[in-house]
Image (cartoon, rainbow, N blue to C red):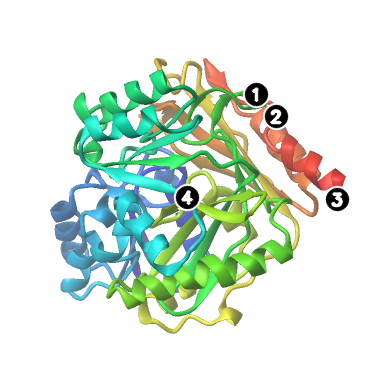
């Protein structure tokens, strides 16, 4: 089979390495891929949001199956366009990808089907939103409705910060058209959990839970990033909580989408907060998370391609998906200064990963025989092991063998998870 994977980050590298395990795979194309992915797939310079370019490539290269990984092409209808030409895909169609593409839509869906989430109000007028804030409580969460590269959420500690956020999003359009509508939500507290799930629109099979570390610096300080590291499983996510989430969140979401004529087939990501009143949905994503994928897939014992085909065909069953016992940890190596100003173009020196070690490349390009930095988040050093402590130790040991000028990593990935595990 010729497989096409749309995207070019660490998430896509993890997906490609998993797909390569299937003996039916003849060739994998990555659009656009990156300099590190090039060791595992043929990279072609077609941007992930160039839907027509992707479709033309898939036709001309006789692609048998496509995996559309990032949010932009999914929301733009890339799966619809490919499947119209008879190319089967893993990923939701445009009318289902709206669950991430519009936060107002997803909030209305949750209200309609009784799915627990934060109280909120939607606004299309900045003055009305500001008037609402003046009578509200703080902290308050202000969200741009559409996609904003993961940066469209602002937690306002004061009325002044809230008003500034509304004006930035709705008036100054710092997130473009994504800010034409906003949500103002109550501020929830509790541990956060990421749960990716496979679903064919009827059956929902959650993957191993994970814990992301969004802040740039140790002790969860500094600016929000795309994620500085992850661990799986998340020790806060107990079997009892998992059962409650399946009954009150996962199944109602998938069933609600089907009832709305928006059957979701692909990877549905549940961003949860375990509040004192029970688990609540913070956000949905219509695809694999990054860097959650980098710790979840190394624990997958089943064949990823077989699962993806079953999702597409609507034949997914629980016995198709099996995860190994143990844990995994991903430590992200970034360019110093990320997520603000940083320099790139530095040569990367990589060790040869040993068993249960993985290096997933995100922001790098090839220059001749060299691999050089080309982004903020450069790569993820991942280790899987029997225990969370061993996985954390292994990921850091691997990370310290990787060299490039101005490399930066958090030194506390997994610290909270280990503390929670010890309490248990």
- Report helix, strand or loop for mark 1: helix
**Residue that mark 3 sits on:** 424
In the rendered view, does 58 fall on the left or right side of 1?
A: left
Q: Which residue is pictured at 72% across the width and 65% down the height?
A: 240
At 40% from the left and 67% from the top, the residue drawn is 266
Residues at marks 2 and 4, CA–CA distance in whole angstroms: 21 Å
Residue corresponding to mark 4: 289
In front of the other: 182 or 287:
182
Measuring from the top left, give residue 283's x and y in whole percent.
45, 50
- Marks 1/2: CA–CA distance: 6 Å
Mark 1–mark 2 contact, CB under 8 Å?
A: yes
Vertical arrangement, residue 220 with respect to residue 322, above or below: above
Which residue is denoted by mark 2 in the rendering? Answer: 412
Q: Is 321 or 271 nearer to us in this picture?
A: 271
Q: Distance between the residues labelled 4 and 3?
A: 27 Å
- Give the x, y percent position of residue 92: 32, 65
């Amino acid at each position: 089979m010729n497989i096409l994977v749309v995207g070019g980050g660490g998430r896509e590298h993890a997906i490609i390495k998993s797909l390569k395990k299937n003996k039916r795979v003849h060739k994998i194309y990555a659009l656009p891929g990156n300099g590190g992915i090039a060791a595992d797939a043929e990279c072609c310079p077609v941007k992930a949001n160039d839907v027509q370019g992707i479709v033309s490539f898939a036709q001309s290269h006789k692609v048998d199956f496509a995996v559309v990984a990032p949010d932009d092409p999914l929301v733009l209808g890339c799966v619809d366009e490919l499947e119209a030409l008879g190319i089967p895909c893993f990923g939701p169609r445009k009318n289902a990808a709206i669950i991430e593409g519009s936060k107002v839509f997803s909030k209305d869906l949750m209200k309609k089907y009784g799915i627990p989430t934060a109280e909120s109000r939607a606004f299309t007028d900045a003055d009305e939103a500001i008037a609402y804030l003046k009578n509200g409580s703080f902290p308050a969460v202000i969200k741009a409705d559409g996609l904003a590269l993961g940066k469209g959420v602002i937690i306002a500690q004061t009325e002044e910060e809230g008003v500034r956020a509304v004006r930035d999003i709705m008036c100054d359009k710092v997130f473009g058209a994504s800010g034409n509508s906003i949500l103002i939500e109550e501020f929830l507290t509790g541990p956060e959990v990421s749960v990716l799930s496979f679903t064919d629109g009827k059956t929902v099979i959650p993957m191993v839970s994970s814990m992301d570390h969004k802040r740039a610096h140790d002790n969860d300080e500094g600016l929000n990033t795309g994620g500085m590291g992850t661990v799986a499983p998340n020790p806060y996510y107990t079997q009892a909580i998992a059962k409650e989430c399946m009954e009150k969140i996962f199944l109602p979401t998938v069933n609600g989408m089907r009832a709305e004529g928006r059957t979701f087939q692909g990877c549905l990501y549940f961003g949860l907060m375990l509040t004192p009143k029970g688990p609540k949905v913070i956000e949905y994503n219509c695809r694999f998370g990054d860097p959650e994928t980098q710790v979840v897939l190394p624990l997958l014992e089943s064949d990823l391609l077989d699962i993806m085909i079953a999702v597409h065909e609507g034949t997914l069953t629980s016995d198709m998906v099996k995860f190994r016992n143990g844990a995994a940890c991903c430590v992200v190596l970034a360019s110093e200064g990320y997520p603000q100003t940083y320099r790139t173009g530095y040569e990367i020196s990589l060790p040869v990963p040993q068993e249960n070690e993985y290096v997933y490349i995100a922001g790098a390009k090839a220059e001749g025989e060299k691999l050089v930095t080309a982004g903020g988040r450069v790569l993820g050093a991942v280790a899987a092991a029997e225990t969370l402590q061993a996985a954390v130790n292994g990921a850091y040991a691997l990370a310290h063998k990787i060299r490039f000028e101005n490399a930066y990593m958090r030194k506390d990935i997994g610290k909270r998870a280990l503390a929670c595990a010890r309490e248990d």
